Image: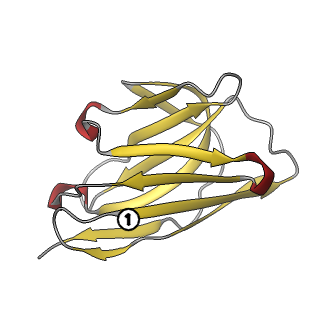
């Protein structure tokens, strides 16, 4: 079973930046895609970004608008999300997960969930 440990969240002012990390471990670290999702209080979990393992294609939800960048270090089994120009509406718990499919408008996670990392954007 694949496990995820997210880190790097925190409190940041609007316009600030954070870099989230997700350490992936478990019986199998082969996956079709991996990416980030987030959940704000009172809202459903939503996809943020994903990376296709085969060809490194990257997808971002429309609300990202060029502010976030997903990347990975295969040697470390770690996935990152660099977030710039953060806005209060980005406040959420961010999770990573492997996905059976993903694209700009859809994110289909398949793994178990880690604890996530809290991102709070506030002045």
Local secondary structure at mark 1: strand
Which residue is pictured at 16% across the width and 61% down the height? 88
Q: Mark 1 points at which residue?
A: 18
**Quadrant for the C terminus in the image:** bottom left
- Snapshot quadrant of residue 113: bottom right
- Snapshot quadrant of residue 54: top right
Which residue is pictured at 43% across the width and 54% down the height? 82
Tell me the colour scheme of the image: secondary structure
Which residue is pictured at 63% across the width and 46% down the height? 72
Query: How far across and how far down the image is residue 100, in percent?
Result: 63, 28
- Front-most of residues 69 and 25: 69
Q: In this view, does 104 lie to the left or right of 123?
A: right
Query: Does residue 17 lie above or below 80 as drawn?
Result: below
Mark 1 nearby-residue class (10 Å; few <14, some 14–19, many ≥20): some
Query: How far across and how far down the image is residue 60, in percent?
Result: 38, 33
- Front-most of residues 110 and 98: 98
Query: Does residue 105 lie above or below 20 as drawn?
Result: above
Query: How far across and how far down the image is residue 74, in percent?
Result: 75, 46
């Amino acid at each position: 079973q694949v496990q995820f440990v997210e880190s790097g969240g925190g409190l940041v002012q609007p316009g600030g930046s954070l870099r989230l990390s997700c350490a992936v471990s478990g019986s199998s670290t082969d996956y079709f895609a991996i990416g980030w999702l987030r959940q704000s209080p009172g809202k459903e979990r939503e996809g943020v970004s994903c990376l296709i393992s085969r060809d490194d294609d990257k997808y971002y939800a429309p609300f990202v608008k060029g502010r976030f960048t997903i990347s990975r270090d295969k040697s470390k089994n770690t996935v990152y999300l660099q977030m710039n120009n953060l806005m209060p509406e980005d406040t959420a718990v961010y999770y990573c997960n492997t996905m059976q499919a993903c694209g700009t408008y859809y994110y289909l996670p398949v793994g178990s969930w880690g604890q996530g990392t809290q991102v709070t954007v506030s002045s």
